[in-house]
Amino acid sequence: MLFNSVEFLIFFPLVTIIYFLLPFRFRWFHLLLSSCIFYMAFIPVYILVLFFTIIIDYIAGIMIENSSGARRKLFLVMSIIGNVSVLAVFKYYNFFIGNIDSLLQSMHVLAHPIPLLGIILPIGLSFHTFQAMSYTIEVYRGNEKAEKHFGIYSLYVMFYPQLVAGPIERPQNMLHQFHEEHTFDFKNASDGLKLMLWGLFKKVVIADRLAMLTDPVFNHPHEYTATTLLLATFFFTFQIFCDFSGYSDIALGAAQAMGFKLMVNFKRPYHSQTISEFWKRWHISLSTWFRDYLYISLGGNRVSVPRWYFNLFFVFLVSGFWHGANWTFLIWGALHGFYLVFAIVTEKISIVPSSFKQKFPDINGLIQIFSTFALVMFAWIFFRANNLHDAFYIIRTIPVALKDLTHFVRSRQIWFGKSDLTVFDQAGVALCFGLIFFMEMVHYIQTKTSIIDVIARKPIYVRWAVYYTAILLILYLGVFDRHQFIYFQF
């Protein structure tokens, strides 16, 4: 079920109202059943895959807690193998087999291609798999008690607001909340609804409107001009942020309305001055997952310098592969790993004089923000491109636009290389820039104060004027074509 659908518009208030009407002892079952209905709205049979991993990790958690010595590690390894095996079959089998087949075919070893699996990736598989793995790892480390209530553990994995695209939660944050009785709190519900409204605005008004311009270009890059490719890359940079952070806002808001608190997943990432800072602000639940369970396990920075560099690069390479079974995602992850290692190696080297930094710290900060943004935007080309051929074509072509940015002003063929741009299309591009500017202004204000608190202090007629305006903008400017969230594919 999509958050930006009519079905969810009915589903959410019903589930929330019934949740508070039910006696506490029945609420876990209500949420679990509702989460099953939510997940089965996509491909019903794949809920069996979810139950398979839930049973494995539920049993593994209890066995780990009741064991000692090597047996504890054995049960943890068996749990991890079970989870990774599901990912390997559904997400990575065709990638590996396809590449092996191509290699063997080029060597004339095979006469016939190796058959691939004709299956669709279960939605959100990587998200709930990583959340399940965090549970068994934390039980093994002694940071969390094994959950004996099978229904509560199932709900930990399946809680519908964050089931298919995170945030990837930890058992320390979520399990105890399912054991606690939440009474209806008007402020919680009100703030949750406001957050959901903002998330929906970012998704259907900004992200999906930008998708109308970026999707045709990235699907057929050879048909468009260099300026168009540059503009599409810039727009996709904000599209993916609004799409993913919009989902996270709706998830956090839906949970908050029922009294649950999920971890914040985004903190204005495009305001970062370094790549390291970017990853402390972007998809925080995933970056901290890799930090706590992979990077530290590899030794982190408590090793030799070359090994430290390897650890950083390897973690981001795996992060890229987590996103998708495609060479484009691997290169995207490798680029961010390279950015981080390169920044460490050149830490004491700066093209900006130190005197300038001291005299104009604000300007220097802006230079760093724009430099970081440019690096992130460049990497997004690989993330969005359908294949490496398209990605490298875009990269080869974009410098033409950079040499002549005035083409953007002069040309009447920005989006459609074979026909003049209509007034509507010009207005559409201008609207996209305006929406991005508006969002960034909101982010800037949020660095100073909470907009929700500012609105709450206004007279009632001002507050409702703001709410009605937001709803009208969503209805008037929103794109309601059931556009799926980008991160659902992961």
Image: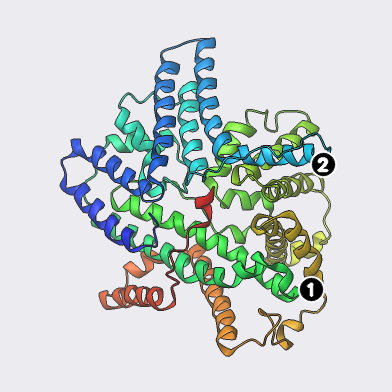
- Residue 52 drawn above or below residue 406: above
Q: CA distance from mark 2 to mark 1?
A: 38 Å
Q: Secondary structure at mark 1?
A: helix
Amino acid marked by disc 2: Ser
Near mark 1 (Cα within 10 A), the count class, few <14, some 14-19 or many ≥20, is few
Q: Quadrant of the N terminus?
A: bottom left
Helix, strand or loop under label 2: helix
Give the percent coordinates (x, y) of residue 478.
43, 73
Foreground pick, 206 / 348: 206
> Contact, CB < 8 Å: mark 2 with mark 1?
no
- Vertical position of residue 299 compared to residue 457: above or below: above
Q: Position of residue 405 (x, y in %)?
A: 76, 79
Residue 343's mark?
none
Per the image, the residue denoted by label 2 is 106
- Residue drawn at x 28%, y 34% is 179
Horizontal and vertical percent position of residue 471: 35, 73
Amino acid bearing label 1: Leu
Q: Quadrant of residue 424?
A: bottom right
